[in-house]
Amino acid sequence: MRIRNIRTATVATLAALAVAAPAGAAFADSHAAADAAAKPSKLTVKSYKSYLVKQRTPAAKKTLVAFRALPKGKQATFVKQLQNREAYVALAGSTKGSVKTGKRSSSVSVNKAVTITRSTKVVSGPGKAPKAISYRLTEKIFGIPVTSEQITVKYQLATKGKAKKVVKASAAAKVVNTNAAIGISSPKVVKVHAKGAFVTAKATFRATPQVKSFGKKVVKDATIRASHTKAGAYWSATLNNR
């Protein structure tokens, strides 16, 4: 009798779960659908201006002034390019150089409206003085910056016999974004690894669409490496899409 009761209870439990599972799945699906429905289908000139006003940041204020100065035709093209996923994907590249104080930048055209500017800055004091290497990529529409992603590594050098050793290494990532079509997050803590005469910093940037027209999310990995060996002091930097 006891075994029969247990079997009966088990069957009843499985039947309840079978009924609850579709209901739970339906709830999850409806919740996801509600989130998708809440997202605007596209960005407009009017909604973009409203977005910039609400941001209340120095970057947003500068963008708003520059955007309002554009002719109506270019304003429409500007907003269209904000939603151009391929333009944001083009925010990538690599570069390298020697660890010597200096700055450099170069720009490439994505289309008639969009350009990507890659900038590097190196600060290298003598001996044990702190050293810093920054790599920044900026997307511009009609010359107006809309998205900037940067990774920086800082460190000092100590002498171990005849060899040099990287010490007190740290890193940081920074995002400046006035593109209302995407929200971009950067890590609060950037991974940095120092061993001997080498140091590596890595950061991940995640772009989440705020309008349906942008498409899927984009994830980018940024890396800076530096070395101080007998062959010389060199660095390299990359920002790549996954």
Image: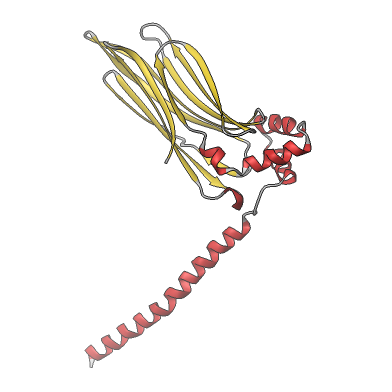
> Residue 72 placed where, x, y %?
78, 38
Quarter of the picture containing the C terminus is top left
- Residue 90: x and y, percent? 52, 35
Q: Quadrant of the N terminus?
A: bottom left
Query: Residue 135 placed where, x, y %?
Result: 47, 24
User: Looking at the image, which residue is at 73% across and 33% down?
Assistant: 67
Q: Quadrant of residue 8?
A: bottom left
Q: Which residue corresponds to the image point at 41% horizontal and 25% vertical from the top-left?
A: 237
Relative to the observer, which residue lies in front, 234 or 23? 234
Q: Is residue 37 above or below residue 74?
A: below
Q: Nearer the viewer, residue 63 or 214?
A: 214
Q: Is residue 98 above or below residue 193?
A: above
Residue 183 lies left or right of residue 230; in this view the side is right
Q: What residue lies at 35% left-to-right and 81% top-to-bottom?
A: 13
Instruction: Depth check: give the residue in front, 95 or 52.
Output: 95
The answer to whether residue 148 is left or right of residue 61 is left
**Residue sticking out furthest to the top:** 126
In this view, the residue in front, 56 or 103, is 103
The answer to which image quadrant residue 157 occupies is top left
Residue 205, position as x, y percentages in the image:
47, 38
How many marks do you count on the picture?
0
Answer with the quarter of the image where residue 109 lies.
Answer: top right
Q: Is residue 225 above or below residue 111?
A: above
